[in-house]
Image (cartoon, grey):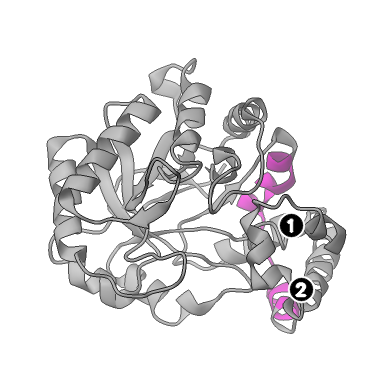
Amino acid sequence: METRLLGNTGFDITAIGLGAWAMGGGGWLFAWGPQDDRESIDAIHHSLDRGINWIDTAAAYGLGHSEEVVARALSDIPRSQRPLVFTKCSLVWDEKGNISHNLTPSSLRKELEGSLRRLQVEAIDLYQIHWPSFSPTGGTESPGLEEAWSTLAEMQRSGKVRYIGVSNFDVGQMERIRPIAPISSLQPPYSILRRNIETSILPYCASHNIGIIVYSPMESGLLSGAMTRERITSMPEDDWRRRNPDFQEPKLSRNLKLVETLRAIGAGRGRSPAEVAIAWTLRNPAVTAAIVGARRPSQVDGFIGAAGFRLSQAELEQIDQN
């Protein structure tokens, strides 16, 4: 599979990385419903067999469980053959599972030790601040970014973290922290339905050698070609997508119509709607790679071809007409 250099890291990563959000399982605020750990581990092994060389997870996914599943999947793989593992910090939880945001140095250091323990590694390849600010009920203030970034830079100097990056930051927030230490990567949402990073964020990162690993290129499965109204209705109560406006009317009808366009384009090229949606994000030269989640091996087979698929200009224009 094609590889691309991630920012200033020296990591040559495949154009697609495996996302482990849903592998955290059910029972927490941003769950995707129940998940079988054995299927998660099989999906990880299959993705590696298909050539993927990096996995993205986070401490908050399943309240630590996703990191534990990743560690279990990699435990029998020789270290020289293991994929890169990227994880994130800043979202913490209490004994009742309530999630809050914390960028204080003491909390970040505690989070790092927890992730190292759950992942069963001595150093994390890429450690990212998950959110500059976060509230389940809204809120956009982002105090403490400079101190938090200084703390991650100290972690990097200590050798417990190889490179440091951010997720969900805007240009102003990156500009606040960049003088403290280089930003190796940004992880923003990006899909045919969410293009706002094209205006300023992608140009900024390109000009400062900040790698871009986009998430939700299929808009959380909505553009996969497998999503239907019936499936949405039958989602588990703890699947966060039930609360997402893109999965509800009036947006849902428009989005499903777009999927049919992706399906038609893919059919002519022997590709799935999912591969078309992912390839659309990878067409942008500022994008290093895309994170794609999977819950079972068959899902990996449904999107892996996007890594080497190139849309024509006519196909891109057809997508833009929707």
- Tell which circle, 1 or 2, labels the residue nearer the N-terminal end: 1
Q: Look at the image and tell me whether residue 310 can be seen.
A: no
Range drawn in magenta: 299-319
Q: Look at the image and tell me whether residue 33 can be seen.
A: yes
Q: Quadrant of residue 120?
A: top left
Q: Position of residue 21 (x, y in %)?
A: 54, 46
Q: Is residue 257 left or right of residue 35?
A: right
Which residue is found at the position 55% from the left and 76% from the top? 195
Q: Is residue 308 magenta?
A: yes
* The C terminus: image quadrant: bottom right
Q: Position of residue 240 (x, y in %)?
A: 62, 57
Q: Is residue 271 above or below residue 66?
A: below
Residue 224, numbered circle: 1
Nearer-the-camera pick, 136 or 15: 136
Residue 308, numbered circle: none
Q: Nearest to the eye among marks 1 and 2: give it.
A: 2
Nearer-the-camera pick, 25 or 255: 25
Nearer-the-camera pick, 125 or 145: 145
Q: Position of residue 94 (x, y in %)?
A: 37, 45
Which residue is found at the position 13% from the left and 46% from the top? 154
Q: Which structural element holds mark 2?
A: helix
Around disc 2, counting alpha carbons within 10 Å, would you say few (fewer than 14), some (14 to 19), or many (20 or more)? some
Which residue is found at the position 63% from the left and 34% from the top? 50
Please name the amino acid that badge 2 sits on.
Leu
